[in-house]
Image (tube, coloured by chain):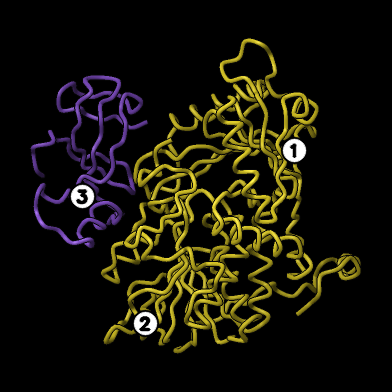
Amino acid sequence: MQKYSVFSLIKNALKGHKDWEVAWKDPAPKAEYDVVIVGGGGHGLATAYYLAKEHNIRNVVIIEKGWIGGGNVGRNTTIVRSNYMYDNNARFSEFGMSLWRNLSQELNFNVMFSPRGIINLAHSDAQMNVFSRRGNSMRLNGIDAVLLGREEIKKMIPMADFSDNVRFPIFGALMQPSAGTARHDGVAWGYARQADSMGVDIIQHCEVTGFEVVNGKIKGVKTSRGDIKTNKVGLCVAGSTSILAEKLNMTLPIETHLLQACVSEPVKPILDHVVTFGAGHFYCSQSDKGEMVMGGDLDGYNSYTQRGNLPTLQHVLTEGVAMFPFLSKLKMLRTWGGIMDMSMDGSPIIDKTHIEGLYLNCGWCYGGFKATPASGWTFAHTIAQDRVHELNSGYSLNRFHTGHLLDEKGLGTKTWIS
Amino acid sequence: MLHIKCPYCGIRSQNEFAYGGDADVKRPELNKEISDLEWDSFVYLRKSRRGKHLELWHHISGCRQWFKVQRDTATHEIFKTLKPSEDI
C-alpha cells in the first residue's frame, strides 16, 4: 500500500496527481469468507480492520447496501468524548480515547482528531451537584474532568449569554479537556483503506436480503449479489438493525429514530470547544471550515426516513440561540438526518446472540461516532474469540432480562423523550 | 410537519401532539401469572418496523386524549387514526 506523507504528496503533486493508487479496491464477492461484516459504516469498517490487525483474520468481507461512510459515520456531529459516569461506559469510552489519540498515525490517514475539550453547561445548583458527582466518577476511572465556575466559563466562551435576565443562567460547567472532535469521513476512509490493504473485501451497493441458519448456527448470508457462505456474521447496521433482526426472527430492545444535525454558513473562528446546553438538548462546535456544527433532539417518533422534520430543528435552534445569541444572525447552510438505533436504556449492545456465529453490534443511540474505534476493537475480539471482552461485558443483550441496565441518563425505556 | 387527525378534534399540526410509542405492545393481564420473559418483552422488546407502524399519540396541547395512529415509518404517510378502543 502506498504510504501517505508530505513527501508522497509533493511527489504526486509534481506528477499532476495521476499516480495515486486507489484507496480501496472494488472486488466481486467470493463464495465463502471466514467472517462477514454487514454494514460498511465506521463500526463495520473498524471491526474488519481490527479483525485483520489484532486477530490475523483477513478472509473478511464487508457488505454495504449503499456506499461506505454514507450512513451515520457521515451524518454525525463528529464529537469524541468519554464523559460517562457508569464504570462500564467510562472504561469502554476511555479505552476508545486511547485509540483515538494515535488513530491518524495508526491508519496513516489524517483523521484530524482535535482534543479541544467539551464543556457541558449547568444552569442550576442541582445540575452543578449532578455534574460534580459525574466528574468525580470520571476521575475515579482515570478520565480528566474539571468543574468550572461561571467566571471561568466566561473567559472561555464569552459569546454565550451571560446577561442578567436569561431564562437559564449559566451557573457553571463540567469540562472534559481531552474530549474533542475528529473528521468523520476520514475515520471511515482511513479504516477502509487499511482493512482493504490487509485483504478485507469491501463490497458496496450490495444488500443483505436474508440469512442461512441451520440448527441454530449461522451458515451464510443471502445478498443482492449472490449467496455467501460463512460461519460468522457480525451485524453493524445501526438504524437498520431491526430490519435485519426481523429476517432472523429476533425482536430486539431497539427502536429506530431520526436524529437531525445542521451546519451554519462558515464564519471566522469564534468557538474553541464543543459546548452543550444544559437546559435542553443542544450542542455546538465549530468545524475547521468555520461552520457552526449543531445538533440536538431526536424527531421523537419511529422513523427510517434519513431526513428530518422542521419542528424539531426549530426547537433545537431555539435552544441554540438561548445559549449563543449570535447564532440567530447566521444562515443555515445544510441540515440532514440519520437513523439511530435507540436502545431501551441508552447504552449499546456488543454481544453474541442465541444463534451460534451471529454477533450483534447496535444500540448506539446518540453516541455511535465517538465509539467507532472501541466498538470495532471489542466487536472484533468478540467475533474472533467467540467471547466478549471485559470492556464490552456490560453491553450484553440479556441485560434487559437480568436487570443490569446501563441507564446513564435515567430516561427509562423512552429514550426518544427529550 | 406532520398533520395528524385527532379522532376527537380533527386535523391539527404535529406540535400539538406528544408521541407515546408502539401501540402493538400489550401489557400482560393484571393478576395473571406471567413469566419474566413475557414481562421483558412488554417492557423492552420492540418490532420497530420499517413501513406501517401502529403507534400511540397524545393530543397533549389539545383535548389531552390518547389515540392510535397507523403511520408509515419510511414515508410518514398517515393511513388511519383510531380511538384507543378501536382496532385496525
Do the residues indicated by labels 1 and 3 lie within the same chain of the protein? no
What amino acid does circle 3 point to?
Answer: Val
Instruction: Please state if B32 lies on the left or on the right of A187 as rendered.
Output: left
- Report the disc number at residue A290: 1
Q: Report which quarter residue A93 is drawn in.
A: bottom right
Residue extending furthest top? A165
Question: What is the distance, in whole Å, between disc 2 and disc 1 at their CAs?
Answer: 48 Å
Please give the name of the residue rendered at 31% of the width and 36% of the height, measured from the top-left corner: B19
Q: Is residue B84 left or right of residue A71?
A: left
- Chain for colour yellow: A
Mark 2 or mark 1: whose residue is earlier in sequence: 1
- Residue A322 higher or lower than A219, as above or below: above
Residues marked 2 and 1, same chain: yes
Residue to which mark 2 is pinned: A356
Relative image position of residue A196 (x, y in whole percent): 64, 78
Q: Colour of chain B?
A: purple
Query: CA–CA distance between discs 1 and 3?
Result: 46 Å
Looking at the rendered structure, the kind of residue marked 1 is: Gly
User: Which quarter of the image is occupied by the C terminus of chain A?
Assistant: top left
Three-letter code for the amino acid on which mark 2 is drawn: Glu
- For residue B25, the mark is 3
Q: Secondary structure at mark 1?
A: loop
Between tags 2 and 1, which lies in front? 2
